[in-house]
Amino acid sequence: MIRSTVRSTGMYLPERIVRNAFFEATLDTSDAWIRERTGIEERRFAAADQATSDLAIRAARDALDRGGLDAGEIDAVIVATSTPDLTFPSVATMVQAGLGMERGFAYDIQAVCAGFVYALANADAMIRAGLARRVLVIGAETFSRILDWTDRGTCILFGDGAGAVVLEAAEGSGDSADRGILGIDLNSDGRHRDLLYVDGGVATTGKAGVLKMQGNLVFRHAVEKLAKTAHLALDRAGIATSEVDWLVPHQANLRIIAATAARMDLPMERVVLTVSQHGNTSAASIPLALATADAAGRLQPGQVVVTEAIGGGLAWGAVVLRW
Ligand code: ACO
């Protein structure tokens, strides 16, 4: 049986660190409110001359270096993003060119904050179908470009960044046969469009638009749906919650993460947290958290890792893998 296993991870964060106090100058908000209600202390914003593909290429190079790979050994590039450089071509083909790849195929996936979970599922399907043996899966965003700086309920939440994972086919029996992606659950429900959307686009306003969110309603859906999708993915993997070593959640809000961990009976020591330093980087948040934990030596071979996310759509899902 073919399994998709993690070869390496990588990440890139823009240099500019923006602390909560930055927003106190222009908005009726405070560092204390933001910390207490979201867990966020700081986030990164890309420089004016940095686009999403620039961040994605840096994260991809890091993942290739850490995996001891050349770009020529990659068969496919999938980028999860809602903030592409251009309407087309895809960010993924820009990454392909940026890495100097002359073969393979590349495309973007758009499922907002659930994008990386969808991209992992997509890469896994490609590998199992025999269409690619090694896939570079990237989450990359520049949400600072679609924020309403007058809306204290949204602009304080988001940051820019990119994370990457190299997934590769593993075959056969023995230890390696147990590793890799073991269970997936994906969902969306378009009836909730108005809870979280960007009010622009090429076919409507012709402008990029800004993010609009009914935060407290999204919060309620998140708490209700995330533990459920994680449990469904674990069931499909045939793994009990008690066997989970790490929950690596989408980093939107510390209170959502804590509520989900509680519903899964997981102590917070087993949860990877980056929200305080990165803010919500949408599709980039899970690969950034994976790469951060991996670089710190926290994710060890054989450990069970659960990722989950929810975002605009609404779209949500979970992936269970053995590291
Ligand atoms: N500073 C001070 N006060 C604020 C701020 C702020 N930055 N933001 C909102 N408030 C106020 C509100 O105006 C409201 O005031 P009012 O009672 O006078 O009307 C009060 O705080 C409570 O507002 P709520 O929205 O109920 O606050 P809540 O505790 O829910 O926190 C937050 C808001 C942080 C946005 C939270 O709802 C949240 O994290 N929601 C989920 C976000 C999320 O996970 N999104 C999904 C992924 S994102 C994606 O897919 C792109």
Image: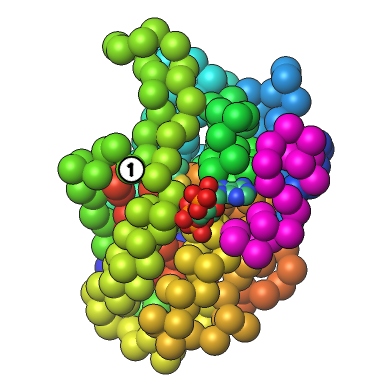
Residue range of the region highlighted in magenta in the rendering:
21-39
Residue at image position (30%, 65%) is: 225
Where in the figure is residue 216, as x and y percent of width and height? Answer: 41, 55
Provide the residue designation for mark 1.
195
Residue 275 left/right relative to 190:
right
What residue lies at 30% left-to-right and 48% top-to-bottom? 315
**How would you classify the magenta stretch by its main secondary structure?**
helix
**Depth check, front residue: 78 or 265:** 265
Q: Residue at x 25, y 79 (%)?
A: 235
Q: Is mark 1 within 8 Å of ligand 1?
A: no
Q: Would residue 184 be visible to someone looking at this image?
A: no
Is 238 left or right of 287, judged from the image as shown? left
Q: Residue furthest bottom?
A: 242
Three-letter amino acid code at disc 1?
Answer: Leu
Examine the rendered structure and indicate whether residue 79 appears above or below residue 273.
Answer: above
As drawn, 224 above or below 67: below
Residue 123 spot, x, y in % from top left: 37, 48
Residue 36 part of the magenta segment: yes
Q: Callout 1 environment at 10 Å: few (<14), some (14 to 19), or many (20+)? A: some
Count of picture labels: 1
Magenta span has 22? yes
Query: Which sits in the foreground, 129 or 270?
Result: 270
| Residue that appears at 32% across and 59% down | 221
Corner quadrant of residue 25? top right
Q: Quadrant of the N terminus?
A: bottom left
Compared with 252, 197 (above or below) is above
In the depicted view, which residue is nearer to us: 273 or 134? 273
Asked which secondary structure carries label 1, the reply is helix
